[in-house]
Amino acid sequence: MIRRSLACMLTLGLVACATQPQTPSPSPQASGVPVSPPPGSKGPAEAAPEAAGANAAPVDLTPVPFEVARANFVRDTAARYGIPAGQIEATLAQAQIRDPIIAAMSRPAERVKPWNEYRPMFISQARIEGGKKFLAQHRDELMRVQKRTGVPAEVIVAIIGVETSYGGNTGSYRVLDALYTLAFKYPRSGDPAKLEREVRRELFFRDELARLFALTRDEKLDITAIKGSYAGAMGMGQFMPSSYLDYAVDGNGDGRRDLFNSYDDVFSSIANYFVKKGGWVRGGPVAVPATLQAGRDAFNPTEWAPTWTLSELAQRGYQPSVPVAADLTATPITLEGSTGKQYWLGFQNYYAITRYNLSKMYAMAVYQLSQAIAGQELPPA
């Protein structure tokens, strides 16, 4: 889950922050930045992020030499987290700029696949069966987390299945190298229209690198050894350092938050992310299929929060295809299916899944995979 915020650092060489901007960027995973894609796929998100950034603080687009930016980073991270500057410098001396990471981040975006092509990337019979087996193996831990947080066990399992194939593909890059590369050598396209986004992305990864120092100190991890995705996401749930710091939970009470080896911690942390970041509603629905009245245009609001009452949606031609509580609010979803458009209504818990990765199709893939793991029949793609 790459966290979608650029935290305001003291002076990280390129930006002067007045407020903490909130900009689209992976969940624990970044939009358009695949974390641990299954073989043959691009990654969990071909995101169409919400319109955002209007309130983001301006950034200075003036180029800053690598040596200056790096020195500022050492100084500011030391002051921010109370870590000796010499220790930070010695660690950075072991980091490597990795050309494959730059190349991967520079790849042109693929076309946005329609739902009927997107879903098979993440929902297959093998993944469903793998999810059922994983849930059975860890049922006791998962049910404890479900009882405590209200997040269904099958949803937690589906996240792990989509992100890392149930822990089988958590990434092979040193996180230190990944974040160091993207923090100081984020690729530039040369397109002036893209420069601001590229600078913001570099600053996002620079902040994540700073947080990695705090995280590895606090959790007693070897900063030079931990591995993850080429975007710096870690563990079975693919948490970025900021999300690890803010939402990880010590699920087994051993005094550490271990998202690499402790299933209790992993399950509790994913659920905590949904509750604290996404506002998960215990016992609430995720999404239901809907119909759109003939002759009415699909409604695609730029803001994804489920703020529309069912009566307001009915005025726009939407009707849920199954009974739902009249007092719920929802957001409309349109998917390009194999036989035409599909219409859904997404509730607060659907919105919570989009906080993990800013993609409506990602959220639907996670939800439908969770339903299949729980033994429900999949709707047509």
Image (tube, helix red, strand yellow):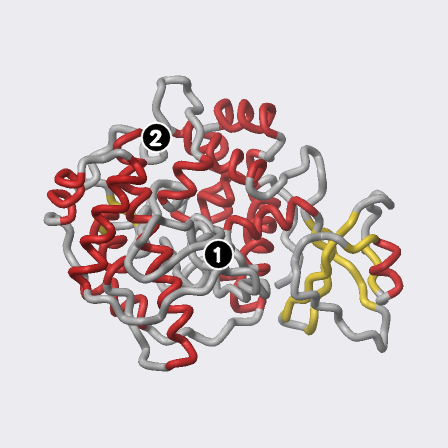
Frontmost residue, 59 versus 220: 59
On the image, which quarter does residue 167 sit in?
Answer: top left
* Image location of residue 93, percent across then percent down: 10, 49
The disc at residue 188 is none
* Image location of residue 164, percent across then percent down: 38, 47
Lower sequence index among marks 2 and 1: 1
Marks 2 and 1 in Cβ contact (< 8 Å) = no
Query: Disc 2 versus disc 1: distance between alpha carbons?
Result: 26 Å
Q: Can I make out residue 143 in this image?
A: yes
Residue at 58% from the left image edge and 63% from the top image edge? 50
Q: Secondary structure at mark 2?
A: loop
Residue located beneath label 2 in the image: 258
Residue at 80% from the left image edge and 63% from the top image edge? 291
Horizontal side, residue 381 vs residue 136: left or right: right
Q: Nearer the viewer, mark 2 or mark 1?
A: 2
Residue at 36% from the left image edge and 49% from the top image edge? 9
On the image, which quarter does residue 191 sit in?
Answer: bottom left
Horizontal side, residue 88 vs residue 113: left or right: left
Q: Secondary structure at mark 1?
A: helix
- 137 up-or-down from 50: above or below: above
Q: Amino acid at mark 1?
A: Phe
Q: Amino acid at mark 2?
A: Asp
Residue located beneath label 1 in the image: 122
Frontmost residue, 199 versus 110: 199
Frontmost residue, 134 versus 220: 220
Give the position of the C terminus as an image quadrant.
Answer: bottom right
Q: Residues within 10 Å of mark 2 (few under 14, many from 20)?
A: many
* Image location of residue 317, percent across then percent down: 85, 66
* Image location of residue 58, percent across then percent down: 45, 64
